[in-house]
Structure formats: C-alpha cells, structure tokens
Image (cartoon, grey):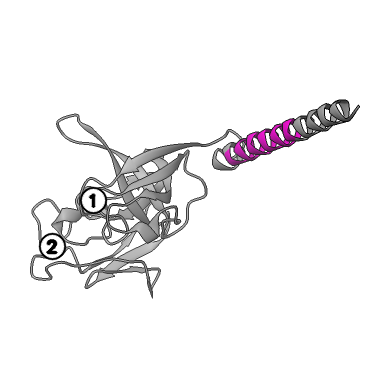
Amino acid sequence: MAENRGQAGQSVNRDRVAAVVRWATLAVVLAGAALVLWMTRFFTAWPETFVGSGPSMEPTVRPGEYFTARSPVGELYRGKLVIFRFVHEDGTVFHVLRRLAALPGDTIAMRDGRAIVNGRATNWPYRVLEPRAHSSPLARTADLNTWGPWIVPRDSVFLLSDTRDIIGWPDSRFLGFIPKSALEAEARRMLWSPSRRGMILRRLR
C-alpha cells in the first residue's frame, strides 16, 4: 500500500506540473497575441524594420541603427518622424526617414538651423556640422540654415532632416513641399544600435 501511495503521489505531482506548464503556455500565447494586437493596432497597421543608411538624421538616428516603423501613418503632428517615398530622377525609389516640421497651412522658417513654425522656435534635436557650408545648387533657398517664412499648401507637409547641412538631402529645402500621399509610415522604436545600447526599444522622438 505504501508503494501505491507513492505512485499516487508521483502521479499527482506530474499532473500539477502538467497543469502549470499548460497555464504557462497559455499565458505566453495570450501575451504574444496581445503584443501583436498592440503593435498592429488590431491588425490595421503593420510594423516594418528600417536601418539608418547615412548621417542625415543624426542625432536622432545614426548610421547602422535599426528601428521599427508602422504603416499607414497615423495622426499627423509637428515633430513626428515619418518615412516618405522619394523617387529619384533616375527612377530609383527611396524610403526616407524625415521629421514632419509643418502641416498644411503652417508658416515655417529657419534661423541658423532651428526651425520656426508659426512664429515659434521648435525644440527638436538638430545639428549643423559646418555653418560656413550653408549653400547648395540643389536647394530651393540660397541659405540652407536661414530662410523663410514659407506657407505650406493644402494636402502637403514640410519635411526636414535633423542634419541641416547638404547631407540632409533630400528634404523639403531641396524638394519643396511634400504631398501627404507620399508619407508611407511612422517611425516608432529603436530596435538595435551598435553604439547606443541604452536606446534599444526606446520610442523615437
């Protein structure tokens, strides 16, 4: 009988372990499903992965840093990081990360690299590498760092690179106002960085 009781005890323990495993598995599945629903806005927006291919969006995104983006673009607001579709004159299509600086009807200007929107200086991160290199034959303004004011037309936005020098091409200083229809996605979170480990999974702003 002692042997039978021992076998019964082992069976109960096995049942308990199996129940714990089942509950743990269910919890993981539910957590994964909740994460998918959250990341996709209940299957209405799907995440993508992009990599910074150059220095034009430093200091926000450095070359070689991976970040997530979600499509379609949600509500538009000033300072938002977006991906827009740029077609080069040779037909090559680029998906470019830029900062949405001004909305339809806004007045935008720039003074020494700082964007001025509707008469107010912005506090978005930016940099000017070489103040003396402030002109480009590609630009629509004589001075890349000081210009305006310009009024954004209806159904268009004004996009800026965070690096104000010529390596900030292409943005609205070179291309003009960008149709809202060219906006493809909104940047979300840093996925991986070779030099800034503290930025991983942080929201991009």
Element type at mark 2: loop
113 in magenta: no
For disc 2, the marked residue is 142
Give the percent coordinates (x, y) of residue 82.
39, 48
* Quarter containing the N terminus: top right
Can you say whether 194 is above or below 41 in the image?
A: below
Q: Residue at x 27, y 68 (%)?
A: 110
Nearer to me, 41 or 30? 30
User: Is residue 71 something one can see in this rendering?
Assistant: yes
Can you say whether 16 is above or below 60 in the image?
A: above
* Tag in front: 2 or 1: 1
Give the percent coordinates (x, y) of residue 55.
20, 54
18 in magenta: yes
State whether the magenta stretch is mostly helix, strand or loop: helix
Nearer to me, 93 or 34? 34
For disc 1, the marked residue is 63
Tell me if mark 2 has few (under 14), some (14-19) or many (20+) residues whose alpha carbon lies within 10 angstroms of its own.
Answer: some
Give the percent coordinates (x, y) of residue 70.
46, 41
Locate residue 122 relative to residue 36 in the image: left or right.
left
The answer to which quarter of the image holds residue 14 is top right
Q: Earlier in the sequence, mark 2 or mark 1?
A: 1
Say which amino acid is labelled 1. Answer: Pro
